[in-house]
Amino acid sequence: MNDRQNILEEMSDRSREVFRRVVEGYLDTGGPVGSRTLTRSMSEKVSAATIRNVMQDLEYLGLLDSPHISAGRIPTHLGLRMFVDGLLEVRDLERGDREKIDATMGSNERDVATMLDRVGSALSGVTHGASLVLAPKHEAPIKHIEFVSLSPDRALAVLVFADGHVENRVFQPAAGQTPSSMREAANFLNALAAGKTLSELRDAIQAEIKNRRQELDVLARAMIEEGLAVWENEGETYARLIVRGRSNLLADSAEAEELDRIRSLFDDLERKRDIVDFLELAEEGEGVRIFIGSENKLFSLSGSSLVVSPYMNADRKIIGAVGVIGPTRLNYGRIVPIVDYTAQLVGRLLSDRGKG
């Protein structure tokens, strides 16, 4: 960050203006910006040859690139990063965007998952990009747990929470499970579950199994551990990832190579069960973070950008995140306030729900 800031500060006013106008032109059109175009918009009257010399200097610094033989330039990922950090002018949230987001989330859905799904659809619709919503784990106390055998290699774990929320997950139990071992496992869990959240129950179960390992039937112990792992895999921080708007990115991509990159991105998203790594940096502080291209391993192949903001509960604890994916030429100045507003709104809605 400091090195990039130093480069900006050491630039002449002319170099800084050429750089800014090239980036803004690229973000607006998606194509290279030529010297002749800039001669018509520069604040001082300069020749196309002078501008070409400045562009060459910026290219030498790694901030601009020539995609074709023509004189036009586009920003590199480093150039975009420097522009976002030092020159980006973030607009106020447009009234129409705010009204669309408010309207989508104004139905006061009782179910958190449904509400967050609507958030994803709203973000995708307003930004014309793809949206990501990372949903928080359910942390209400547990009322009842049950295991149901569906077939020799499939079982259903049912959790009923004290606030009425119900979660059902299908999983593959260890070989040899019987209806008897499932009942024994459920009875064991229900005896410990009263008043505990899922994470608290997990800690209690581990301690109990350690203390009563000899007493517990081998199958029942396996069922308990298998069933609990359905929700509480080590390192799993969030419940699920909601992705909306894939068609928006595909529709905006005319190049076959870009289509392949976007498909690669979504294949990667759909394969990754533990998506937490890609948001860890967003949790280092409040507010919106921007990841450009290869800055995040998830987007290293697709060349996409991500604008993301964590949202918090009433205790100011980060419990999830919302974001927008798009090409590197996203309209950052417009999308940053949209993501920021949406994250704050989701946080308030979840906090108000917790008070009810």
Image: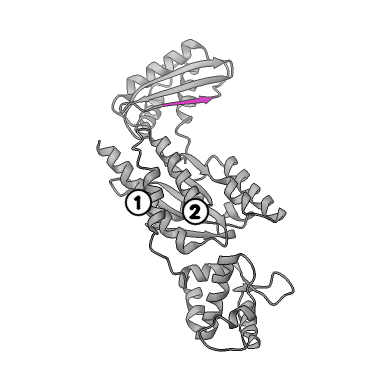
Q: Give x and y (percent) for residue 146.
A: 42, 19
Tell me which amino acid carries mark 2. Answer: Thr
Tell me which amino acid carries mark 1. Answer: Gln
**Based on the displayed image, in which of its 4 quarters is residue 309 positioned?**
bottom left
Q: Give x and y (percent) for residue 308.
A: 46, 54
Q: Main secondary structure of the magenta part?
A: strand
Instruction: Say the numbered circle drawn on residue 127.
Output: 2
- Establish if 283 lies above or below 192: below
Residue lying furthest top: 180
The image's colour scheme reads one colour
Q: Give x and y (percent) for residue 327.
A: 58, 58
- Establish if 257 lies above or below 153: below
Instruction: Say the numbered circle drawn on residue 344.
Output: 1
Asked which secondary structure carries label 2, the reply is helix
Residue lying furthest left: 355
The boundaries of the magenta stretch are 167-171
Task: Work out which quarter of the rendered image holds the C terminus and state it.
Answer: top left
Residues at badges 1 and 2 in contact (C-beta under 8 Å)?
no
Residue 57 left/right relative to 345: right
Q: Give x and y (percent) for residue 79.
A: 56, 71
N-term-proximal mark, 1 vs 2: 2
